[in-house]
Amino acid sequence: MSEKGFVGDPFISRNGKELVEVSIPNPDKADTRPWETFVISPKMIHENKFGKGVWMKLPEDGMTRLSRSVKNGIDDAGQPIWGRETREVTNAELKALMEPYKDRSRGSVLSDLSDRKEETAAAKPSWKAFRHQDVAR
């Protein structure tokens, strides 16, 4: 994961095991649904020293169940009724979901800036061009 705060605080499950909840951000920025989550033993997940990422010990050929809260409707008092939506993913898919930054384009910052300069220059005339027109009048 690329941002801090995806690993929740440890809690004790119903069967007495210590677990942590891990949140996975939605890949689409426009997606406003709650993030998907899964639980794992705190011994199997570690945040790096800068708090900007995690690493997990999961079997490569295993499966993980992801879930998210979904709004099922509104009750008579006007309060939302929430349910859970679950799905199973392979641990390879889970790794891809946890590393969305690897899908972003890897264009350099300088080329992005030069593209923006060209767009800006085409959108508005420069001050020199404006002053030159003013003198000609």
Image: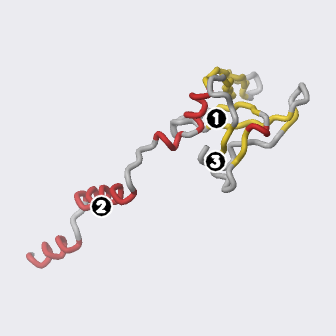
Q: Residue at x 71, y 37 (%)?
A: 22
Mark 2 or 3, which is nearer the eye?
3
The answer to whether the residues at label 2 and label 1 have Cβ atoms under 8 Å apart is no
Front in this rendered view, residue 75 or 52: 52
Question: Mark 2 highlights which residue?
Answer: 117
Tag 2: Cα neighbours inside 10 Å, few (<14), some, or many (≥20)?
Answer: few
The answer to whether the residues at label 2 and label 3 have Cβ atoms under 8 Å apart is no
Which color scheme does this rendered protein use?
Answer: secondary structure
Query: Image quadrant for the C terminus?
Result: bottom left
Question: Mark 1 highlights which residue?
Answer: 35
How far apart marks 1 and 3 lie (CA) works out to 17 Å
Q: Residue at x 64, y 34 (%)?
A: 34
Q: Residue at x 13, y 72 (%)?
A: 133
Q: Residue reaching furthest bottom?
A: 135
How far apart marks 2 and 1 lie (CA) works out to 36 Å
Describe the element under mark 3 as helix, strand or loop. loop
Describe the element under mark 2 as helix, strand or loop. helix
Question: Mark 3 highlights which residue?
Answer: 53
Q: Is residue 26 above or below residue 111?
A: above
- The quarter holding residue 57 reads top right
Q: Is residue 48 above or below residue 45?
A: below
| Residue 127 x/y as whole percent | 23, 72
